[in-house]
Amino acid sequence: MGTIEKLTDRQKRRLGEFVREAIYLTEEENAAIEHQIPMTQELFEQCVGHCVEIGAYFRLTCLLNEFSYFANEYVRKIEEEVADSDIEIHESTPEELEAGWQRFRAKVKERYGKDAV
């Protein structure tokens, strides 16, 4: 078995995320992520919130991809909250959206490797 020093930077980041997940996520959240119990909308939203709080972006990406039906409902709720508030959101052009997406992908690839996105 290798030592931590032999891990790549990417492996060290994933290990750090894993440890934060193990410490911070509840047993129920972990059970839902591991399909030991059914994932619910409420659990999904808790998991997403906790992943953002602890910087577990690999897990967050996995959740959004695997449970896209919950993600869609979550986005709908957020949009509804914003629509009911005084917050004004700048409408981005398709070019701005594409540029932002490409910047995001580049950062994820840089941090987690080319296979992450």
Image (tube, grey):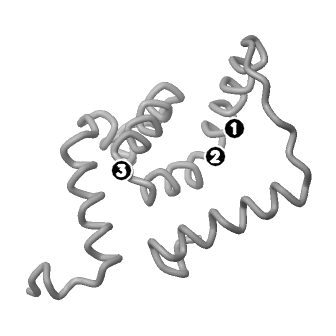
Residue bearing the label numbered 3: 34
Q: Give me the C-alpha separation between circle 1 and circle 3.
A: 21 Å
Instruction: Check if mark 1's residue and mark 2's residue have beta carbons within 8 Å.
Output: yes
Q: Is residue 65 toward the left or the right of residue 16 in the image? A: right
- In the image, 21 versus 33, the foreground residue is 21
Q: Where does the image place residue 104, in percent across and percent down from the top left?
A: 63, 63
Foreground mark, 2 or 3?
Answer: 2
Q: What secondary structure is found at the residue carrying circle 1?
A: helix
Q: Where does the image place residue 71, in percent across and percent down from the top left?
A: 62, 39
Q: Where does the image place residue 33, in percent across and percent down from the top left?
A: 39, 46
Q: Quadrant of residue 106?
A: bottom right
Q: Is residue 100 toward the left or the right of residue 8 in the image? A: right
Residue at 86 percent across and 46 percent down: it is 92
Residue at 72 percent across and 12 percent down: it is 85
Q: Is residue 39 toward the left or the right of residue 32 in the image? A: right
Q: Is residue 50 above or below residue 92?
A: above
Q: Is residue 46 above or below residue 108?
A: above
- In the image, 19 versus 104, the foreground residue is 104
User: Could you classify mark 3 by the number of other residues whose Cα lies within 10 Å: few (under 14), some (14-19), or many (20 or more)?
Assistant: few
The mark found on residue 72 in the picture is: 1
The mark found on residue 68 in the picture is: 2
Q: Give me the C-alpha separation between circle 1 and circle 2.
A: 6 Å
